Image (cartoon, helix red, strand yellow):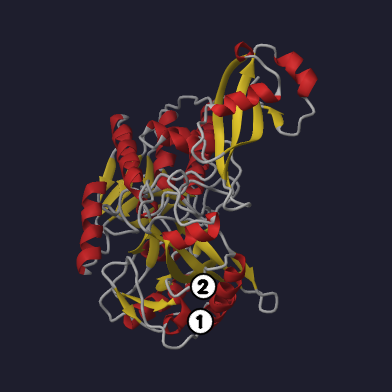
Amino acid sequence: MPILLRNLALNPGESEGLLLEQLLARFSLGRDEVSSWRIVRKGIDARKKPRIKFVYTIEFTLADEAGFGQRYGGDADLEIVTEMAEPIFIKLDSAKRIIVAGSGPAGLFAALRLSEYGLTPAILERGRPMAERVRDVQSFWSTGALDVESNVQFGEGGAGTFSDGKLTTRVRDRNIGYVLTKLVQFGAPQEILSLAKPHIGTDRLREVVTNIRLHLESADIPIRFREKLSDIVANGGHVRGVVVNGRFEYPCDILVVAPGHSARDTYRMLHDRGVVLEQKPFSIGVRVEHPQEVINRIQYGHPSQPTLPPAEYALAYNNARTGRSAYSFCMCPGGVVVAGASEEGGVVTNGMSNHLRNSPYANSALVVGVGRGDFAGESPLAGIEFQRLWERKAFETGGKNYRAPAQNLLAFLGEKGVKRVSSTYRPGVQEADLSQALPGFVTETLREGIRFFDRKMRGFVTAEATLTGVETRTSAPVRIVRGDDFQSVSLQGLYPAGEGAGYAGGIMSAALDGIRVADAIAEKLQAKRNH
């Protein structure tokens, strides 16, 4: 059985081959006694800056595992690995017509998993294929000409395509390794299998998504672009078909809805058709942008070190009196702030970085949680209207041309005479008072939080930092309610999936949810076949 050894450390620049030497020395082993070894996790320990360490977990096998266990079984850094059996895909010969609406992580991995059961769902994607979508987004960033069906939110790969490509999740799921292995199979860097905080980067993620599509098409799974789910045909409480683009109808017995968190028209259609939805909390705020060297100096003790990756941070603040919290979200080291609008007349910001994270700037969302008590009315769509309100205020504050309102961090905190703003956001920024584009309680909580963050990270508050608004699409403002069988509680055959359905919060968790939905569909079809 494989054995894990944790808490091995190397200095930056030291060869990872020294890990084997540490293993041999620690347990008085000869080289011939170690059958195999590999790195399974690599992280950074920056607690004693500037003496930064890389910290590793390795997996190894031995010729004499029984004897080793008797001698060292009490070592707290050792763990015997219980290997999980590979999933067994029973091939299903089903006449059921399956459609997956959405080609983000949830939709793609649902389709990929269904194909492993021998099923051939059709994928509908309202946006354009990758190459066309990238051109449309670049055009918007350059000119301010927004395509409402092909943008940062809509198109092949979903919203995660224009992000940092983070693959971290707080979800515990046996399929995490499956997802990472599949991503590597389709072109992601091998290192994501061992990094403590794996990421792909927007540039590599585009290649991976394209390769997944080509693989699905080779398995006879059609992917239809520019086909938006505009209605559902139901009869007897069960899905019978879908309408796309308001004109064409496709018969359908099983519909996986993986729309992404910005598909507001899809939420409206589902609500109008009586599908049970509910409000879901989310967060809004701004993007903060520092020179990457500033963050490196705070986190590492020096501005640059070629053997260390660009420094990251994660910060949180809670006001016990108000119950409000501010926190950093989707931190992008070596990245840029991007325009993420999907509706005319609204400004939306997000963060993005390439695989190398080689921009000279670091950015992160700084956001405050909002929920039922902050929305007007009891409608399940009230959160959408809340988002829309502040996106439009940002649009107006920025000059009504998709420039984003921006403010020097010190000026936001009330210091006088501070004017300079510098942001990587395109098509550009307009210096403005960001309190005009945020709810009062968000502004106040952010100001409190930022001062608290500076106590945790001395130097975080600096004239070199700029805030750009607004960040509103942190997660879905709606949940499409489903039961234990993963089907909508109000419409049989409808399977909500992923972040847009309200059951995930990022690339990895969305992919995992798509897999869970696919497994539930296969289990149901298998049960019917056995009867």
Specify whether residue 143 is in view.
yes
Q: In the rendered view, does 295 fall on the left or right side of 455? A: left
User: Identity of the amino acid at label 1?
Assistant: Leu
- Mark 1: which secondary structure? loop
Q: Nearer the viewer, mark 2 or mark 1?
A: 2
Q: Quadrant of the N terminus?
A: top right
| Nearer the observer, 250 or 35 | 35
* Label 2, label 1: how far apart the Cα atoms are: 9 Å
Q: Is residue 280 left or right of residue 405?
A: right
The 10 Å Cα crowd at callout 1, few under 14, some 14 to 19, many 20 or more, is some
In the displayed structure, would residue 121 be above or below residue 143?
above
Which mark is on residue 349?
none
- Sequence order check, earlier mark of 2 and 1: 1
Q: Position of residue 409 (x, y in %)?
A: 46, 76
Callout count: 2
Identify whether 338 is placed above or below 523. Answer: below
Front-lying residue, 266 or 417: 417
In the image, is residue 93 above or below residue 434? above
| Residue at the spot 27% in from the left edge and 64% down from the top edge | 148
The percent coordinates of residue 149 (x first, y second) are 27, 60
Horizontal side of 84 relative to 92 (left or right) equals right
Q: Are marks 2 and 1 in contact (CB under 8 Å)?
A: yes
On residue 413, the disc is: 1
Q: Quadrant of residue 213?
A: top left
Looking at the image, which residue is at 44% across and 73% down? Answer: 387
In the image, residue 258 above or below residue 369: above
Give the crowd class for mark 2: few <14, some 14-19, many >=20 residues within 10 Å: some
| Residue underneath mark 2 | 461
| Residue 114 in view of the camera | no
In the image, taking residue 108 as reference, residue 382 lies left or right, namely right
